Structure formats: structure tokens, C-alpha cells
Amino acid sequence: MIAAIRVVTHPDGVTTSSYKYLQTSAHITLMAFIMKHIKSSDQNSFINKQNKVIQSSFPVLTRFIPNISKLDLLNLLEDFCNRTLSTQRLAQNGEIEDFEATTFISAYSYNRNNKQIIIEVSYRLIPFILYIKQQYIGGRWKYSASFTSSYSNLIYDMIITNYDKNTSSLKFNLTEIKEMLGIESGTYEIYSNFKRKVLNIALHEINLKSDICIDLVEHKVNRKVMFIEFLFRKNNCT
């Protein structure tokens, strides 16, 4: 698996954000920790171009990310500093009207004596975090953190960012879905292998552990699968 690029379409339909997927449960829970501290009132920080400073302690963070060492946490924060979120808005003719890029964390610090950790989030990231936070209502990040397959995380994330947009299905050709899952070209060329090793495992895990159920529909041309469609609904078993 190569790095998957996640693209999120904002409610206005013309603004999109893209980022390299945060793949592990530690990444997801740290992002949930940041989301927890970004409030709707922080829109003022965005308007005034003021970064958001989150101050916490190592013991508090380890309640979010159990069994993580100080070194692993610092490496995780460093990784967030190196991950870029790109946001663009298109004009009516399809050309880029506005483009901005920022890292998930602008800066961080750790003091060994008082065990205090300071995380600085760029003001440019605030609208995106508030939007994603709406999708992760009800502690949905806990489902993502429980998945063992990175493909489960990607598909679940893909679904919930469309879940409340008056739609109940998403359709892709095989090239599109493989690119979105970060699958290298030439891998899983035989559809039955792709279905067995990626789709079936991910959908089984999502249906078993999360708040949504997904059914897979295959669209064929001359008996060959050309498109797949995810039909999703509320999971009443969780």
C-alpha cells in the first residue's frame, strides 16, 4: 500500500481539502484530541489569523492514546508537523480560484519537568477541523481507532463525510477506488483478489464495529466488474 490521498468536499460543493491519510489508531486518536479542543468560537481565531494553542499534559494525552511512550508521542507529533493539508476552491470555469496549504501542527513542545505538552494548530486548519468534527459526531473517531485495516479507515472516513448529504450510496470505477485507497498501480489486477483481500475485509470490519452498514454492489459490463457501489445505512446493531 502506498500513501493514500484523502479528498474531502466541503458543504459549498466547490471547496476541497486533501491530505495524506493518517493511517494508525494513534494518528486518529491524536486528531480526535485536537478536534475536541477546536470549538466553533475558534472561527474568530481563523478570521483574525491567530493560531490555536492547545496545552495539555502527557498523562492526559495517554488517556486518549493508551500505552504510548513519550518518544512515540513526540514522533507522532513530529509526523503531524510533516503532514500537509491542501485546500482549494474552484471558479465556475473549473480553474483554481484560491489555494492554501498548511501542516496539521504548526509547532509543538514538551517540558520534561512539568510534563506539559503544547500543540499549536494553524488558523488555516480551523475551518477544516470544524467541518470534519461535524462528521465525527457521537464519538465516531472511536470506531476508526478500533479498525485493524487501514482500508477500513479509508472507506469509513469516505462514507461518513458523505453520510449526511442526502445520499445513501457512492459509486467508483476500479481505478478510482484503488487510487483513493492508496493501492499501487498493477496491484490486485484480478478483481476477485481485490475483493477478497481489500473490500471484503474492510466492509466486514466496518459492519461489525461501527455505526454504519455497507453493502457492496458490483456493476458489470459483459460479465466483467467495471464499477463498484457502496450502499450505506445506519447500523442498528452497535
Image (spheres, rainbow, N blue to C red):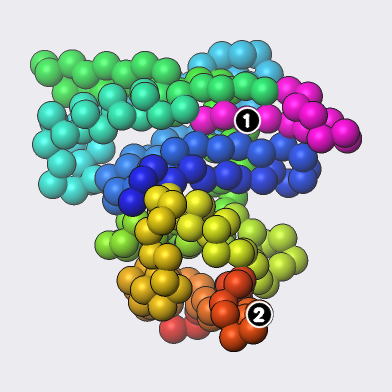
Whole-number angstrom distance, CA of label 2 to CA of label 1: 36 Å
Q: Name the residue under label 1.
A: 87
Q: Which comes before the other along the chain, label 2 or label 1? A: 1
Q: Main secondary structure of the magenta part?
A: strand
* Kind of residue at badge 2: Val
Return the x and y of residue 18 as percentages of the image width and height. Answer: 56, 38
Q: Which quadrant holds residue 197? A: bottom left
Is 187 positioned to the left or the right of 61 in the image? right
Query: Dividing the image into 4 quarters, which one contains the C terminus?
Result: bottom left
Q: Is residue 173 visible?
A: yes
Dividing the picture into quadrants, the one containing residue 154 is: bottom left
Residue type, mark 1 in image: Thr
| Residue shown at 77% from the left, 40% from the top | 14
**Which quadrant of the figure has residue 151?**
bottom left
Task: Pinpoint residue 40: horizontal percent, then vertical percent.
Answer: 61, 36
> Which residue corresponds to the image point at 51% horizontal and 52% vertical from the top-left?
180
Report x, y in % for residue 179: 50, 52
Q: Residues within 10 Å of mark 1 (few under 14, many from 20)?
A: many
- In the drawing, does residue 126 fall left or right of residue 11? left
